[in-house]
Image (cartoon, grey):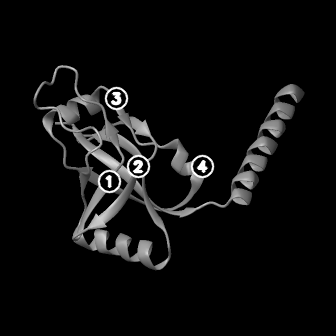
Amino acid sequence: MNNKETEQVIARNKKAYHDYFVLEIYEAGIALYGTEIKSIRNGRVNLKDSFCSVDNGEMFTIGMHISPYEQGNIFNRDPMRKKKLLLHKKEIMRLFGQSQQQGLSIVPLQLYIKNGRAKLEIGLCKGKKLHDKREVAAKRDAERTIDRALKERY
């Protein structure tokens, strides 16, 4: 039996890296139904405007869109329903405390399949201001011009 972990990235939330500074990253499982996991394996997921919240000591992701499975009939669920995240109670309380005290957000970063199970990478994030976004864009442009100059030179 092979002990290697296989990861297959299904969806990334590029907007999260644009709008937030990611301070910490956690891996969480997701409680899904059969047609939802089939749809995820087909790559029919959107994380763009999703976020996580804590409700009664449980963490949920809100706004994650999983398209209905094409071969599913009455078993398809609402694409925008709240999905429960599977984390240890200690991790949930730590994330909740930091998000409440420091004004941080909990945002899904990417969804992937790991050893046959759907996992969601969530990040504890701090929002970027407009000048931060401009600064990041300026650094990226400077790196591009340096790379171009080096390519032309050699």
CA neighbours of label 2 inside 10 A, class few (<14), some (14 to 19), many (20+): some
Q: Which residue is mark 4?
A: 18
Q: Earlier in the sequence, mark 3 or mark 2?
A: 3
Q: Which residue is mark 1?
A: 61
Name the kind of residue labelled 3 in the image.
Gly
* Quadrant position of the C terminus in the picture: top right
Name the kind of residue labelled 2 in the image.
Ser
Q: Which residue is mark 2?
A: 50
Q: Earlier in the sequence, mark 1 or mark 3?
A: 3
Snapshot quadrant of residue 56:
bottom left
Cα–Cα span, label 2 and label 1: 7 Å
Residues at badges 3 and 2 in contact (C-beta under 8 Å)? Answer: no
Compared across the picture, whether 92 is left or right of 77 comes to right
Q: Earlier in the sequence, mark 4 or mark 2?
A: 4
Residues at badges 1 and 3 in contact (C-beta under 8 Å)? Answer: no
Q: Earlier in the sequence, mark 4 or mark 1?
A: 4
Disc 2 element: loop
CA neighbours of label 3 inside 10 A, class few (<14), some (14 to 19), many (20+): some
